[in-house]
Image: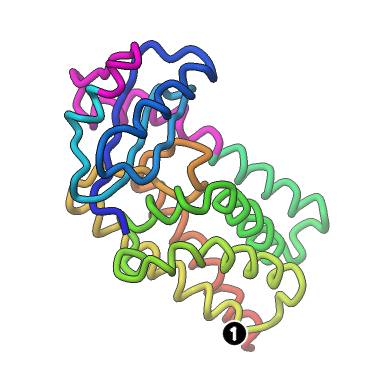
Amino acid sequence: MPDRFERMNVTGMTCGSCVAKIEQALEEPSGVEHVHVDLQQGTVMVSGGAALSRQDLESAIRSAGFDVDGSLLAMDIDAKVQASSFTPLLVAVSLIGMGSLASGGADGFMAKFMGGFFLVFGGLKLLDLRGFASAYAKYDLLAARLPAYGWMYPFVEVSLGLTYLATPEWTGLHALTLVLMIFSALGVIRALRRGEQLTCACMGTAFNLPMTTVTIVEDLGMAAMAGAMLVQFSM
């Protein structure tokens, strides 16, 4: 499990070649285990061992011909990128919702929505399983202590998605989802209460989403739907 996680704002990136140069430069500093460069947001996220040094990372990036903007506080950065950062999340949720309605109206909407949600979001996590596990371990209560859980979690979500579409009447499914989503929310709440500036891994590493109360709303919203269906199919 990575001991350190650094997020930096890099100026001068304009294309895929820039991304490749930065990734190559960050192979040199000791302690580096995983690098994710977001060209659109202009950020670089690095996770690694205790030997990971932000100073070494910044030096490596500058040696590659780019600069690290350390003049802005993390809160200021989040305030500026929050709207654009959450666009992929809003688009994904909206499309899943519209698809669920189009496939049968309000009848069975929650089950279809949750099926689509878990399939899409679980699939995005699978695109970079190592990167997801690294980011998830920074705030999830179980993944922080059991790294294997972070590697397994995307498969759990995909399985939940398929099961919601196949057997939405199974009460055990809703009970499991309810517990899973509440437990996930607890880790996010703890991280936010500590004031930690982390990247939300809800859409994997494909998008640079800052962890905010939106993440809590997402988890508790899914928990609420699972709870509602648990009551519905238990009666």
In the rendered view, does 22 fall on the left or right side of 3? right
Q: Which residue is mark 1?
A: 172
Image: 128 above or below 143? above
Image: 24 above or below 221? above
Q: Main secondary structure of the magenta part?
A: helix
Residue type at mark 1: give it.
Answer: Gly
Q: Quadrant of the N terminus?
A: bottom left
Residue 55 is situated, as x and y percent measured from the top left of the image, at 17, 29
Q: Is residue 77 magenta?
A: yes
Residue 225 is situated, as x and y percent measured from the top left of the image, at 56, 66
Q: Residue at x 48, y 63 (%)?
A: 151
Residue 222 is situated, as x and y percent measured from the top left of the image, at 52, 62
Residue 159 is situated, as x and y percent measured from the top left of the image, at 64, 69
In the image, 161 versus 65, the foreground residue is: 65
In the rendered view, does 235 fall on the left or right side of 5? right
In the rendered view, does 12 fall on the left or right side of 165? left
Image: 110 above or below 102? below
Element type where label 1 sits in the image: helix
Q: Is residue 68 magenta?
A: yes
Coloring applied to the structure: rainbow
Taking the image as drawn, is residue 188 in sight?
no
In the image, 87 versus 130, the foreground residue is: 130
Region of the chain picked out in magenta, as a range: 60-88
Q: Quadrant of the C terminus?
A: bottom right
> Which quadrant would residue 110 be assigned to in this image?
bottom right
